[in-house]
Image (spheres, coloured by chain):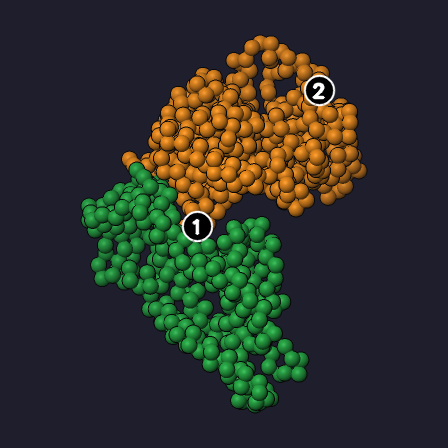
Chain colours: A orange, B green
Amino acid sequence: MTDELVAIVGTEHVITSADRIDPYLADITEHPRGRADVVVRPGSRDEVVAVVALASTMGLPITPIVAGYNVAGIAIPREGGIVLDLTRLQGIEVDREAMVVVVEPGVTFEQLKNHLDRECPELVYTYPFAPPFTSVMANALLDGLNNLSMRHGAMGKWITGVEAVLADGTVVRTGTGAVVDSWFGRAPLPDLTGLFVSTQGTTGIVLRAGLAMVPRPEHRRRWFAFGWSLTEAYAAMRALARTGSFDDVGLMTWPAAKLLFGATEGFARADDEPLAFLFIDITAASAPELVARLQLGREILDEAGIGSVFEVDQLVKMLPHMAKLAELPTTLDFLLDFPGGGLAWVGAYGPGASWVDGAAAGMELLEDHGFPPFVVARPMDGGRYFVLRFVACFDRGDPSDVERTGKCMGALADCVLDHGYVPYKASAPAAERILARAHPGFAALLTRVRDALDPDRRLNPGRWPKT
Amino acid sequence: MDPHDPFPRRTATISLMVPWITEVLSTLPGLLRSYGPGRSLDPRTRERIILAVTEVNGCRYCAWIHGSWQEFLGGSVQVADAEQALVAYAQACAEAGRPLPADDLRAVLPADSVRAVRATVAQIEVSNLVGNTVDGMLARLTRKRPLSPLDFAREAATVAVAAPIAIPLLATAGVMRVTSRLAPPLPDVDMPPAGEANLLAHLLAAAAPTYFANAVVRLAVLGLPRSIAVGIRAGRTAATVRVGRGRIGVENGISRDTVVVVEGEVEPLLQLATGSIVRELSTVRIRPS
């Protein structure tokens, strides 16, 4: 096998030594180490197709990976075979008129931002709370959430079409790019793009994807505000989202601030400390529009009982090292600095009606398992649904801490499902829980889709188990 | 510069001064506002711009005065990305020897701040040229440069006009330099464990290097013979800052021994802390404990 792979990608891009394969067998989460026979680093789409075709001939499993920071163990190889490291595929093509960018899997958020700033500063993409070295395409294909998801929904919705290679080496296309020379959208064709969204690489290896962009706003402000109860915070998020006038409203509970300032243990909320911090992004095409939106925002926050609204820029003036909180992409890199380097979460999308109860129940579960009650939340898609993400930092080197984290994440997955929320970027155990509660027809349809596209279950094995 | 003149620095000639004086006059309101309340240019940024221009022109008097000023103000030596653009603009102007279009700055700065940057560059250019003229005269007197009586007279006149401004500035810089030397260094901040300190306590501790950067503040406050406690209530959250005897401490809540409590919403307190003093004083209450 190695000789054939070398013939495709070259010697330096085929990794067979155990010490160089090792970093691909685990990630920052509590999920167990995997196994792999070889890591291949193709440098072009043609090379990816050739590797997949070879794996098909030889019946080998393939696990695709870029940064491996999905925080759900999704890129850990479970059944040996080939790890397909796609970081070298870094093509970016911008269609300025259609406001679409076509990216290859290795393009990172940092690269895309720099490219857009340089080549077409009138357009922007949308950014997650993720490290800048993570994959734009993986984030979209896994239906993540970004800073414009409150307005426009989960990232799968931003995909305008894909080119993918199926398990047997067949190259397919979806969206308008399959028919004409522009990936402007998914309509009006049969929407096959969804076959590759949230399926976690089990239906095909996506070679490139069209992604929608938006015009860069002329004016931008970011506020922080303090919420003293979940009810107040929810009321504010709901009201702000429903106006359609704000780019983003997010929430983090009090442990986030302690982690930001370097706390690693002994988390305790002081009596006079806010329960949650809201961040609110306001943009506008003109100064009068901005003034009107700022005024509307103040009124809504006042009405919801949210106090202490202030501009992040003011905070940055006093604390210049906090500049990262005012910038896009905003990264929560302090989460990766936790001793032991472990980071796990259960994130879920669900209805606003059960957000407060779901958040309270999940926070209680975190505390029951010895974690501070760290929640990240956001309204999505104009407020049609909401995010609940429960975050835990832990020591990956301590088996008991890993076990505690795994139990907590399992309990949280049950908890969110109990409250009508569905985990996104679901880990294998969370996916099992989803399928156990799903309409039987959903699991049957997913099984039939996978039977059609990858009957031997060789693509990213172990995901969406039992389908 | 005259290629035959062995003096290597630009001095105050009419042709070099006119563009800068014109620039100073056209941006004078911006210059005045940049020193006033709600200023459009942070003093530390202003000093960085000034020193960047001075480095290009090689004026040792301005370098000493503004080096003293920068040391007095204190603060981070790290230059933020946004400041890099300002410094680059200032250096480009200095190298060109004339004001350059500030179009690139307009893309990243409000109009008021752009005017303040242009004004700052222009006024320090004038100062640099005058300072270099003093050295040019000294070079003539020490025969390192042709005496050239007419040029000497012109330079002497320039220096005489500038002296009433320059001498007090040099004296002030001397005082600032002495103050900086006398002020105690910034100590580590004593505070509760990171997991227990409330957000305000964390913010105050993190802001200590900014608050206490100024040498006079360090000298006056940290040099107190006994510790005093000041309560801060921002919105619903409170913390106490304890200063004196060379130490700084921050704790959750309002301590019983506070001598004064500053109360206000977070935003006005932040603005107060970052310099918009006059505008925000009306929304902040200061009361004895």
Question: Is residue B209 rendered to the left or right of residue A451?
Answer: left
| Three-letter amino acid code of the residue under disc 1 | Lys
Percent position (x, y) of residue A401? Answer: 44, 33
State the separation of the CA atoms marked 2 and 1.
49 Å
Count of numbered marks: 2
Q: Position of residue B109 (x, y in %)?
A: 53, 51
Q: Chain of mark 1?
A: A
What's the residue at 52%, 57% (across, down)?
B115
Identified by mark 2, the residue type is Pro
Residue in view at x 77 percent, y 41 percent:
A10
Q: Are marks 2 and 1 on the same chain?
A: yes
Q: Residue at x 67, y 16 (%)?
A: A449
- The residue that mark 2 highlights is A188
Q: In this rendered view, identify the residue nearer to me: A375 or B21.
A: B21
- Which sits in the foreground, A27 or A214? A214
Is the N terminus of chain A in the top left, top right, bottom left or bottom right quadrant? Answer: top right
**Label for residue A317?**
1
Horizontally, is A157 left or right of A356 in the view? right
